[in-house]
Image: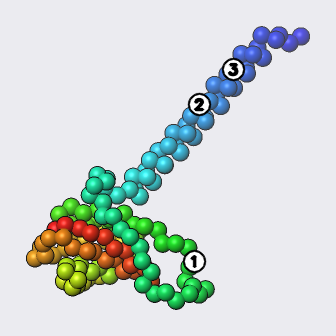
Amino acid sequence: MRSTTFAPAFDRWSLCINYNINKRKMKKYLIMFLCLSVWNCNPIYADDDQVDLDVEIVDGTPSTPERSKVPMRMPRIYQDGYILTLSSFHPEYLINLIQDGEVVYTSIIPAGVTVFELPTCISGECTVQFISGRFCLKGFIVL
């Protein structure tokens, strides 16, 4: 005849084993999540250093199958003096600095570049434009 005292002890033991296995799996998932989040993150800046951007459509032609109807994702661009920090996943931008209605500086920011240095010969308040495809992002910066 079988004793019933071993069944609850066995169940508790199997629960402990399952708990340890699940705990190990959760540790692996947590470590993997932390590694991926650290790999995809950018330097953290205060919100007041972020350049506020407005979007305009430069090319008003209707969407074709080659052009997506999905709205453009607003990039996060931070300013620290003459240095602009962009997210690591952005398209190629044409950057224009405008003072008093005239373009005083134009350059290209290649896709994936995270740090871009502006020329130090320009000072004062400027309108900055980031043009990519048919979208133009405008904002104000002080140099």
User: Which amino acid type is marked by label 2?
Assistant: Asn
User: Which amino acid type is marked by label 3?
Assistant: Arg
Q: Which residue is mark 3?
A: 12
Label 2 neighbourhood size at 10 Å, few (<14), some (14-19), many (20+)? few
Distance from Cα at disc 1 to Cα at disc 2? 49 Å
Distance from Cα at disc 2 to Cα at disc 3? 12 Å
Q: Is residue 92 in view?
A: no
User: Which amino acid type is marked by label 1?
Assistant: Lys
Distance from Cα at disc 1 to Cα at disc 3? 57 Å
**Mark 2 residue element:** helix
Quadrant for the N terminus, please. top right
**Mark 1 residue element:** loop
Label located before the other in sequence (1 or 3): 3
Q: Furthest residue to the front? A: 100
Q: Furthest residue to the right? A: 1
Q: What residue sits 52% from the left and 89% below the top?
A: 61
Q: Which residue is mark 2?
A: 20
Q: Which residue is mark 1?
A: 69
118 relative to 87 in the view: left or right: left
**Occupied quadrant, residue 13:** top right
